[in-house]
Image (cartoon, helix red, strand yellow):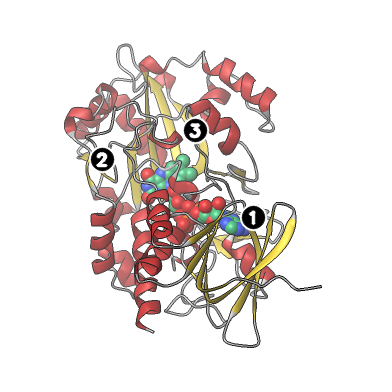
Amino acid sequence: MKKATVKKYESIVVGSGPGGATIARELARANKSVAILEYGSHYKKKGQMNAISNIYLDENLGLKFTSGGISIGRSRILGGSSYFAQGNAVTPPDKIFKEWGMNLSDELSSAREDLRVNLMPMELIGKGTKKLMEGAKSLGYEMKPTPKCVDYSKCSRCGKCGFGCPKNAKWTSIEFVEEAVKNNADLYLNANVTKVKHGSGNFNIVYFNQNGSVKEIIGDKVIISAGALETPRILQNSGIEEAGKGIALDTFQTTYGYTKDVGMKNEVILAVYIESLIEEKELFPAPYMYPALSLVRDIAGYMPKKFDLPSLSKVLLNLRKVKNKNLLGMMTKIRDEITGEVKNDGTIIKENTESDLKKLDEAFEINRDIIVAAGADPKSIVRGVYEAGHPCCTARIGKILDKNQQTEIEGLFVSDASAFPSPLGLPPILTIVALSKRLAKHLLSN
Ligand SMILES: Cc1cc2nc3c(=O)[nH]c(=O)nc-3n(C[C@H](O)[C@H](O)[C@H](O)COP(=O)(O)OP(=O)(O)OC[C@H]3O[C@@H](n4cnc5c(N)ncnc54)[C@H](O)[C@@H]3O)c2cc1C
């Protein structure tokens, strides 16, 4: 029987989040033959509840919990977690790049341009957020408009940035995937990459499951960008056992409180932030309104044990008791320690350390004080559960990767949040895009 020919590419990119989409776009622009293998589908349904039930609460595609009970948001679909992202595009302080021993300033500037980063306009900032700005000011904190990758001429201020922006005003990495495909990249959807094997020549074989069969394609260079929770599992299956040892999350503390007359219902969240605390305390505080887990448990008195449709319906019924019209919220992200691990079966071992808990306590105090100064009744303050959305550092440069992001397997690279040598403690998309631009430059110059 004739054996089917295995397709060969100069570069194979695994994953289409900010890391993967950027590298695919840069290489395809330079006329390299590129394949993008993406685990998920191109999710096109509109509507917040559809996105929550079809993606966010599906354990293969969305929310995961660590051994320490920290929830980690993500989306395993075309565009990766940029689909759910809030559009914040913050440039980290130089201090972090000094720590990394890396100068990313050119790549960051190019990333800001490509993502059309601009400041959240004051006229789109809601009443509740403005109250929090006043409260913060009375305590000596200046809240500044957040840099966002949002085209405000399209934005309708609906506050649904995190559920697939209905107006396509927010940048997602699907934009870069589409550009790569225009430049002749092949896109494989629903392709679950399991491992990479170095061939006897100067190439690598990528194995993936698609439509019930095991398939393979060949690439001179393979770039794994499956996100910090999945990249280490692919590396482990490929023989790099140390991948996944250590993870950081930028864990955040949420706090809510009721006022008599103002709330943040349907406002764009994280519209402003306190920049001065990033360098000073490694904290990232910003107005926030996601009255899901914390409020359902503490105010409405119901916490689901598992996320299936019946428990989702209960959550929704209980959410009616939460009066968003009079609710103010804050979140503060911390720069947590790299501890725990991502195991090969997908389990995430990660507890808050003593130092993390100290920072989270401080985060709560800042959140609470600002909400109360903004007019909330101190007795109504709810201290939320610990959440996260920025998993990183699971295949770090300097540990699993060399300075050019190559693993111990020749031609096998990593370019996503896994590669961060240490966490940022603030929105990472801009830095992930910059890191992929840096790797693209390296690959194209060799
Ligand atoms: C609710 C929420 C809000 C956020 N808001 C912001 C924000 O405002 N600003 C910001 O900077 N960051 C934000 N983030 C974080 C940001 O979205 C992520 O840090 C970023 O998307 C990570 O990029 P990545 O390329 O490392 O991985 P991902 O975005 O996770 O992409 C990985 C891709 O690989 C695919 N994949 C996974 N496994 C496989 C496999 N086995 N085979 C093939 N493909 C695979 C996935 O489906 C996915 O498409 C937010 C995150 C969440 C959850």
Q: Earlier in the sequence, mark 2 or mark 3?
A: 2
Q: Position of residue 5 (x, y in %)?
A: 67, 73
User: What residue appears at the point 39 percent right and 84 percent down from the top-left corner?
Assistant: 446
Q: Position of residue 14 (x, y in %)?
A: 54, 62
Q: Position of residue 106 (x, y in %)?
A: 24, 68
Mark 2, residue position: 151
Residue 302 seen in this snapshot: no
Mark 1, residue position: 349
Instruction: Tell me the crowding category of disc 2: few under 14, some 14 to 19, or many 20 or more residues within 10 angstroms, Cα based.
Output: some
Q: Looking at the picture, which amino acid does disc 2 mark?
A: Asp
Give the total number of marks visible in the rendering: 3
C-alpha distance separating marks 2 and 3: 31 Å
Q: Looking at the picture, which amino acid does disc 1 mark?
A: Ile
Mark 3, residue position: 384
Q: Earlier in the sequence, mark 2 or mark 1?
A: 2
SS category of the residue bearing label 2: loop
Q: Nearer the viewer, residue 144 or 216?
A: 216
Write down the quadrant of residue 196 in the picture.
bottom right
Q: Position of residue 32 (x, y in %)?
A: 42, 72
User: What residue appears at the point 36 percent right and 29 percent down from the top-left corner?
Assistant: 159
In the rendered view, would you say 374 is above or below 254?
A: above
User: What residue appears at the point 19 percent right and 40 percent down from the top-left corner?
Assistant: 142
Q: Earlier in the sequence, mark 3 or mark 1?
A: 1
The disc label shown at residue 259, or none = none
C-alpha distance separating marks 3 and 1: 21 Å
Instruction: Tell me the crowding category of disc 1: few under 14, some 14 to 19, or many 20 or more residues within 10 angstroms, Cα based.
Output: some
Q: Looking at the picture, which amino acid does disc 3 mark?
A: Gly
Q: Are marks 2 and 1 in contact (CB under 8 Å)?
A: no
Q: Residue furthest right?
A: 1
In the rendered view, would you say 439 is above or below 210?
A: below
Instruction: Tell me the crowding category of disc 3: few under 14, some 14 to 19, or many 20 or more residues within 10 angstroms, Cα based.
Output: many
